[in-house]
Image (cartoon, rainbow, N blue to C red):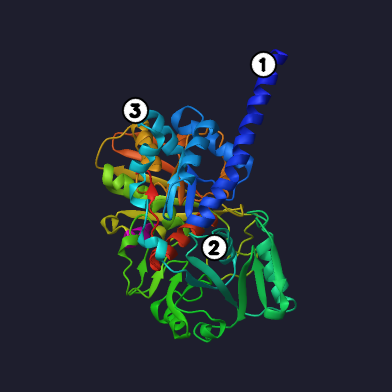
Amino acid sequence: MSQAEQDRILQDWKGRQELAEEMLPVIGKLYRDRGIVLLVYGRPIVNCSTIEIIKAHRYVRQHEGVELSVHDSARVLRALAGMDLCPARIDLGKLTLGYQREGGGRPLADYLAEKLAEVVGDNPQKALTPKDVVLFGFGRIGRLLARLLVERAGAGNKLRLRAIIVRKGKGADLEKRASLLRRDSVHGPFNGSITVDAANNAIIANGTFIKVIYADKPGTVDLTEYDIHDALVVDNTGKWSDLDGLSQHLQSQGAKKVLLTAPSKGEGIKNIVYGVNHTDIGDDDRVVSAASCTTNAITPVLKALNDRYGIENGHVETVHSYTNDQNLIDNYHGSERRGRAAPLNMVITSTGAAKAVAKALPELKGKLTGNAIRVPTPNVSMAILSLNLKSEVTKEGLNAFLRETALYSPLAQQIDYTASTEIASTDIVGSRHAGVVDSQATIAADRRCVLYVWYDNEFGYSTQVVRVMQEMVGIRLPSLPH
């Protein structure tokens, strides 16, 4: 390659960097002032770096065969900034390529006005008042929920993290809680600033004041003492999972609803997988479950397949990262095999995920069996779906359907799709989808198929929990363009 060609490539890169840098404040202002969450083919670009924006544009090549031009998307972004928009999720990439393919020579402003008509001008979501959130427990899921809630600060942030309730630990409890929020061995450092307000027993994260309240059990704290009212309490301890136990939270003054970040037990609690049955949540539902990480990963894919091909029956094998429930070294454990050292062993164990699918998708009741293997990785799991279908399929046809589902269906937030031949588990860390279909591993013939679905059992699940939280308090942001 000549020096002139090398110089041209470098100048092109610098030009894209410069455009991406110009986009950053516009993206941030649209979010902070109007509640617009911008994406590029499902990848959020709010709070992203210049390089991350360029990578999001490059990602489009996986689906369209060509990289999205930053020059083209920057033009669309400038046009969006000049519109009177209500809170919404808007895919900048799809709008940009859509205009190139469907614009037909029309002015860009006219095309955008048509595609975004439902969020132009006044909208009930504009007037929605922020809702208080209290996290009961501050473990792996609790801290990730805190990160997700804090990063959403802005006009579209109708979920306000007001407090966490934990049992008081020994020593410098507050400082240790802040440190665990600041540093994460799997998900990396917190994106921003965290300080400790010892005088008020609080953590301040990116300007969000989070009161730390000490209590040993639900229902013992008067939240109104901290000016917290009609709060959604998110129980991520896993200690209480039935209606009687979780309803104790409602005895707290200032608590209005409860969300469990685990499968529920017994009757009277709806198990919700956002994207599949979230519309089942009624205004009078006081206690709701967000099901499990595995149930969230597989149910959207199963729904898509059942709607298109029909599922006769099948088996779900979960290859799951170890969890805090297991032992670091061999020691006594109440459950079979889980007493063996988690970082050293593959451990066969049970999972209720296959049966739990039926709670969100009743038409699959009795059709699925399931088992699990815990493996020596700290995060990211895989579900292997071995299914007998009612219709014949091919690998190419099945993958094409799943790709379209991931891009353009109502399940686009839940199902991601990769065509990479080199992807491994660590590449899925931080995924904001419930599951990622690994198309290169798909097996399909006649009426049988085997699908491999990756999922970040911590972060991906937490994003699903936030979506259920939004539904419970009436936050419903449309995703555009349709």
Look at mark 2 in the image and give the residue it sits on: 149
Tags 3 and 2 touching, CB below 8 Å: no
What is the distance, in whole Å, between disc 1 and disc 2 at their CAs? 46 Å
Residue shown at the point (34%, 54%) measured from the top left = 368
Count neighbours of disc 2 (C-alpha within 10 A) and say few if under 14, some if 14 to 19, many if 20 or more. Answer: some
Residue shown at the point (58%, 37%) measured from the top left = 55
In the displayed structure, 348 sits above or below 472; it is above
**Which is more N-terminal, label 2 or label 3?**
3
**Which is more N-terminal, label 3 or label 1?**
1
Look at mark 3 in the image and give the residue it sits on: 104
Q: Quadrant of the N terminus?
A: top right
Give the structural element (helix, strand or loop) at label 1. helix
Residue 166, position in %: x, y?
Answer: 60, 77
Q: What residue range appears in magenta?
A: 354-360
Q: Which mark is residue 5?
A: 1
In the displayed structure, 107 sits above or below 276; it is above
Is 356 one of the magenta-colored residues?
yes
